Structures are given as C-alpha cells and as structure tokens.
C-alpha cells in the first residue's frame, strides 16, 4: 500500500502531532495526491474528540488536520455529539495510528482491536515520552495485533519475545536524522534549513528501513549503523539544498567528497605496556 492510500490517525493534536501530520500531508501531495484528497486521509483526535472544520476552538496549527463535517456526517457513533478515538477507528478504518498525546495507556485494547479488524499490517507508533507516558507498550501492541503491527516508539523499549522470536523495537529517535542533516548542511554550505531538506532526510532514512526487504525485520537500521545512515541523510540533504537554490551547485562526486571531508575518522596509535620487562603491544 502506497503513501497516498494510507489513512492516518493522530491522537494528540498539539504542536508535535500537527507538525508530524503537516509533513506527512506534504509527502502525500508530493507522492501524487491532491491536497484536498490528502486532507481527507488525516484524522486528528484531541481530548475533546475528532477535530472537525468549523469548531470554535480550533487552533491555527490544527487547521490542516481538521476533517470536513460532511465527511463524518454519516458515521455511527458510540455517543452522539462527540467522535471518540474508538469511533474514528471504527468508521475511518485507519492504517496508521500515531500517538503524541502524552497520555499513558491512551491506546486501549478495544481501539487497537478495532484497527486490526480492518487492516492486515497496522502501523502503530506510540511516540509520547518518557516511557511512563507512552500510549501503549510494544508488548501490549504485539499481543493485541497478534504480532502483525509495525511498531515505532518515542522511548526506548527492550525487545519483545514473540513466539520464541525476539522482535526488536526501534525508538524513532532524532539521532537517525539530525546528525546527517547537520553534516549535509555544513558540507554543501547551505544558507538555511528548510522543510524540504528535512523531508529529503526522512525519505533517505526510509529507504534504509530493513522492513523494505524483510517484513519481519526491524523498522530502522541498528544504532551501530548510524554512521552510514548519517552519510546517506547528508547526501540527500545536500542535494535538496542545491535544488532549493540554497547551496553552491556542484556535481554528485564533489558533494560526496565534501561530506567525507567533514566526517571525523578516529585513528588510534598503538601503545606498549611494559610489566616486569615483558612488552605487550595494543593496537
């Protein structure tokens, strides 16, 4: 299923949730969807339920996430007058559920069960941190989805033992992107950082996801690979800065050499340890 086919629910419509939604909406438009079509694929839920156009308390940052009133007019609700997260799951049939609410346990079992009824491979990201604030634990999500969910968290969690298989849970940490963004900006001499450069960074990281080639693999590269991840992100950011007219133009090989020149390569000198006349060399 491509990005333009996703139906995305956000629990938590503050600056974090709406910021994520804004970038995903932009990515969906870049993937070929019209902005009007893309907006119909997003559902933002806050403490008062689904955000709908025309509500008097909508903040400017929430406006792009607001659903059209006619789009939900025929929904069947548990309690008329307010559209809950469970109502959204039952009627919108989302493929992606993202938590940025800061509310512990907000992804309750009936909500996740409702999601699983309508999608084979649900994407569930409880992103609130610290760990005590997460919307659901990876272990809970694994059990509630019968191991079918693709999980990313905002806090570190240990692997989940699932049917004698260790499932690694990846923290969607900014360490995967920010070092490469800074490296790319410095290497290409970008005059400022734009949303399009962050989008390029995100796409570069997505292209490195082990899940692309193995459905049972982890979502993100291992932390031990962050050095190569940073290089790939920097390359994408540098190219985007050039396309945005914010950096000096150069060919691909020159850009790559500039990135490599900015990477510190540790070199450790060998040393000798002499004890009782016996020499041991360490390299």
Image (cartoon, rainbow, N blue to C red):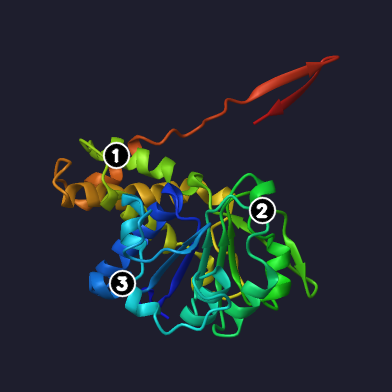
Q: Which mark is residue 104?
A: 2
- Would residue 156 be found to the left or right of residue 33 on screen? right
Farthest residue toward the right?
Answer: 276
Dot 2 surroundings within 10 Å: few (below 14), some, or many (20 or more)? some
Q: Quadrant of residue 269?
A: top right
Which is closer to the viewer, label 2 or label 1? 2
Q: Is residue 215 left or right of residue 60?
A: right
Q: Nearer the viewer, residue 258 or 149?
A: 149
Residue to which mark 3 is pinned: 38
| Above or below 282: residue 40 | below
Give the crowd class for mark 3: few <14, some 14-19, many >=20 residues within 10 Å. many
- Residue 37 percent location from the top left of the image: 28, 76
Question: Of label 1 and label 3, which has the lower sequence position?
Answer: 3
Q: Which residue is mark 1?
A: 185
Residue 125, quarter of the rendered image: bottom right
Rendered location of residue 181, percent (x, y): 36, 43
- State the residue in front, 147 or 128: 128
Q: CA distance from mark 1 to mark 3?
A: 30 Å
In the rendering, which numbered label is found on residue 273? none
Q: Secondary structure at mark 1?
A: helix
The span from disc 2 to disc 1 (Cα, nearest Å) is 37 Å
What residue is shown at x 35% (from left), y 79% (from top)? 71
Residue 103 rendering spot, x and y as whole percentages: 62, 52
Residue 217 image offset from top left, x and y in percent: 60, 69
Image: 15 above or below 119:
above
Report if the CB atoms under discs 2 and 1 are less than 8 Å apart: no
């Amino acid at each position: 299923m491509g990005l333009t086919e996703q139906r995305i629910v956000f629990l938590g419509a503050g600056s974090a949730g709406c910021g994520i939604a804004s970038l995903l909406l932009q990515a969906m438009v870049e993937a070929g969807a019209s902005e009007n079509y893309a907006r119909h694929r997003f559902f933002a839920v806050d403490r008062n339920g689904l955000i709908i156009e025309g509500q008097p308390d909508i903040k400017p940052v929430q406006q792009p996430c607001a659903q059209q009133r006619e789009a939900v007019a025929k929904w069947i609700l548990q309690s008329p007058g307010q559209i809950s997260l469970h109502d959204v799951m039952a009627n919108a049939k989302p493929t992606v559920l993202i938590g940025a609410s800061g509310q512990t346990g907000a992804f309750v079992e009936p909500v996740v069960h409702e999601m699983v009824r309508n999608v084979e491979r649900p994407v569930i990201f409880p992103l609130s941190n610290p760990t005590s604030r997460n919307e659901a634990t990876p272990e809970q999500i694994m059990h509630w989805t019968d191991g079918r969910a693709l999980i990313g968290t905002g806090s570190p969690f240990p692997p989940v033992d699932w049917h004698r298989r260790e499932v690694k849970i990846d923290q969607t940490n900014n360490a995967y992107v920010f070092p490469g963004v800074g490296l790319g900006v410095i290497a290409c001499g970008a005059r400022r950082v734009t949303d399009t450069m962050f989008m390029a960074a995100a796409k570069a990281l997505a292209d490195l996801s082990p899940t692309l080639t193995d459905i049972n693999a982890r979502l993100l590269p291992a932390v031990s690979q962050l050095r190569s991840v940073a290089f790939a992100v920097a390359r994408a950011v540098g190219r985007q800065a050039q396309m945005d007219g914010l950096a000096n133009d150069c060919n691909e090989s020159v850009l790559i050499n500039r990135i490599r020149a900015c990477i510190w390569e540790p070199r450790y000198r060998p040393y000798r340890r002499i004890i009782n006349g016996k020499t041991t060399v360490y390299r």
